Amino acid sequence: MTLLEERPEVRPVDVPALAAHDIVKRFDGVHALERAQFSVLPGEIHALLGENGAGKSTLIKILTGVYAPDGGTIYRNGEKVDFANVRVANAAGVVALYQELSIIPTISVAENILLGEQTPSRGGIVQWGQMRKRAKAQLESINQRKIPLNALAGDLSPVQQTMVAFARALATDAKVLILDEPTASLTDTEIVELFSVLRALRDRGVAIVYVSHRLEEVFQLCDRLTIMRNGTHIVTKDVADSHIDEVISLMVGRNANELFPERGTATDEVAIEVRHLDGRRVKDVSFVARKGEVLGIGGLAGSGRSELLRILSGAQKHVGGEIVVGDTVLPSSPGVGKALEAGIALVPEERRSQGVILAASIQDNIAVANIPTVSTAGIVSGAKISTITKRGIADLKIKARSPRQHVGELSGGNQQKVVLAKMLARKPKVLLMDEPTRGIDVGTKAEIYRLIRQLAAEGTAIIAVSSELPELIGMSDRIIILHEGEISGTVPAEGADDELLLSYCYGKHQS
């Protein structure tokens, strides 16, 4: 499947729909933005790129009235504006849709589209007929006629929820849409549908700012791109005049081929052996992972990749086969606690909902996963918590104001590092990682790859699931591909290519 289509030329427009000139923003005396520049034209999709911490999120929040700049000027259609808050920005037609959509799951689609001031009412009484009529018109304007108006928004698919959020933004007459990682939870088919809607909005003259760590999407969809680094503007250019390797180099300040460390840490000693494992989807799966080895697991969505990791971590029961770690044979339903005691730790795919407590501090997140380490005779030691937290922050280079900062305030990459820190404090024999770099920038990906290889060099066996084939090849020593729950191929990572792995993903080869 390809998302590629011929990209039309950017329309010649005299005045940007939204522009930021020389924006300055400081937090606790530290520059988050230093004379940052950005502009988006009516009728274009403009990618805003950079590592976590490059200043993208801060700039977006200034453009939408969440933060006030310490310096610089914002222009809307060539006129200087002061967005005192989000409501003022929305009234000016500037709307941001974030990765965690602000959909209210317990009310209907129609109510979500026409929330607040958009709700048609007379004398304080909601005009339900008018509401459904207007909501239907908004959905039809983006070719979403099949979404049921009376359905609860929480019952919709991720892409349908995204479309409802678009319809709500357009109901406020949005002319500038800022999208933050809009495809993070979508399938390939849903991404095709989303891109079709975005192109239609572009053709209607809507200015779209597209923030994504998936560079392939940028080159499939966007007209121009702007790269930020360390809070400053690096370059703005037409997508057609660039390529992925150049973008990576400009984002991180080094060549793309330096992302993956060298291999060669695997030993002959078996860390974990899986014998004829059966689950709800996985069938008769057998393999070994050795100390110091990075074993990649690939396959299409629904192939059983994530289920395999859940079973190994004790989070899901297996109905047949054995899992052996050292001299320990895990029971069919060990539970996460028993698996952790045996030396198996999992870094889950959904870090925000499964890996961390967003409302808790970094040190509390690390401590709660390491109670035996930080307590004696049932009494928790603050000094011990401080020690393992400081070690985790230093070893993983977590960017935070202090160990007491709430995890929800960190970037996606740093949240992932907190998950890693709390698992690594347990010194696992086997570390399971499900999509270890999902939703994080290229520079932080390189740090995660370095950490993976460093752990392997220390004797940990790493088993990592990834849906990105170049990542599987680059970070692994050996790769297992699952097809419909079974192993369809096992290959050395060195010398493997996307075509070979895809053939196994579709079950065209059997090993």
Image (cartoon, helix red, strand yellow):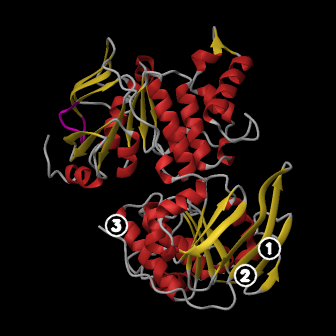
Q: Is residue 370 above or below residue 44?
A: above
Is label 2 in contact with label 1 (beta carbons under 8 Å)? Answer: yes
Mark 2 residue type: Ala
- Label 1, residues with CA under 10 Å away: few <14, some 14-19, many ≥20: many
Q: Is residue 280 magenta?
A: yes
Residue 100 coordinates in the image, percent (x, y) = 56, 58
**Which residue position holds label 2?**
92
Which residue is situated farthest in the top direction here?
377
The answer to whether 121 appears left or right of 29 in the picture is left
Question: In which quadrant will I find the N terminus?
Answer: bottom left
Label number found at residue 189: 3
The answer to whether 452 appears left or right of 233 in the picture is left
**Which residue position holds label 1?**
83
Residue 367 coordinates in the image, percent (x, y) = 63, 26
Q: Main secondary structure of the magenta part?
A: loop
Mark 3 residue type: Thr
